Amino acid sequence: MFRNTTRRSLAAKLVAVAAVVLLLAAGCTGAEEEDAGPIRIAIVAPSASNDLAFTQSMVDAVNAVGETREIEVAVTDGTFIVEEAAAAIRGYAEDGFDLVIAHGSQYGGPLEEIAPDFPDTSFAWGTAVDFKGLDNVFAYTVRSDQGGYVSGTVAAQITGTGVVGVIGPIEVGDAKLYVDGFAAGVAAQNSSVTTNIVYTDSFSDVALAAEAAEAHISNDADVLTGSAQMVVGATGVANEHGVAWFGTQANQTALGESIVVASQVYHWEVLLNEMIDKIEAGTLGGEVMTATLANGGIVIEFNDGYGLDAGIQAAAEDVIAGIADGSISTGQ
């Protein structure tokens, strides 16, 4: 009797223990799911979130990430002063954000000092091709010369005067790549077309961009392009004179629905989703990622309102395909 009773009691105890284990497991799973929560992403950028250029390209990209993932987003924009950006980057890391995006090549110095202090935080820095040897920093860049080349081939076909004008900001990074790619595309399409290039030495000086646009037009340019947030000054002049415009970084159709031919748009979400996948798998950085036409990080978005000739657009699509498959080189 005792033996049987003992067995029955032991069996009952085992059942009870098993039930407790199951409940604990379920509780742990629920806690883990609750603790996971949304992915917290912070953006620190030099210009306005709605600049229709560099900063907006990243804000739009993070919003696109939010279409397929649960995220929490914070943005500090207008931090052209590097010290202010550094304070914001450090603040977001202290607040426990999962990914802090330092969206400006000028932020590399501060990031090199900040990132080692937060080894469990992932940082993204661009445009840049150097992650500073830090295993919690992703560097990201873009082959903006590719979209520039496509736009240049179209510009060479639509110019009536045989002169196109380019307004660059500072001769660095994706801005210089774009300008060089555009000029190469014009030359490849029609070597008799003249490409005049002016750098304003500023990313943000709208007045200088407007002056440069006026100078180009006075020298017979009937097609213009440019890079950085300053381009609102140039597009205003282009609208005034009915001069065609090619955008880059973000879709700039809103700056002139009748003059914007096409825009090279940075779809950073392609790289961001890859970063987040790596972060969730335990890799916080130590890599360089590049947006291209081939991986969808760059997309040429044509403006239907401009009324580009269908044959010219079809030829541009062929150039896009050729750059993507490697059969066409932009020369960069």
Image (cartoon, grey):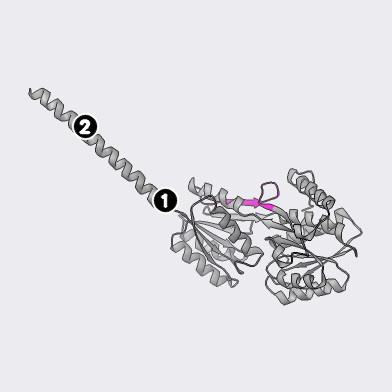
Is residue 289 on the magenta stretch?
yes
Q: Mark 1: give few (<14), some (14-19) or many (20+) Cα within 10 Å.
A: few
Q: Residue 13 sits in which quadrant?
A: top left
As shown in the figure, which amino acid type bears the numbered disc 2? Answer: Leu
Q: Residue 206 sits in which quadrant?
A: bottom right
Q: Which residue is mark 2?
A: 14
Q: Mark 2: give few (<14), some (14-19) or many (20+) Cα within 10 Å.
A: few
As shown in the figure, which amino acid type bears the numbered disc 1? Answer: Ala
The x and y percentages for residue 212 are 79, 73
Residue pushed farthest left?
A: 1
Residue drawn at x 69%, y 50% is 292
The N terminus appears in which quarter of the rendering? top left
Separation (CA) of disc 1 from disc 2: 32 Å
Circle 1/circle 2 CB separation < 8 Å: no
Majority SS type along the magenta span: loop
Q: Which residue is mark 1?
A: 36
Q: Secondary structure at mark 2?
A: helix
Q: Which residues are magenta?
A: 283-298
Residue 176 appears in the rendering: yes
Q: Earlier in the sequence, mark 1 or mark 2?
A: 2
Q: Residue 247 sits in which quadrant?
A: bottom right
- In the image, 93: left or right of 226? left
- In the image, 115: left or right of 162? left
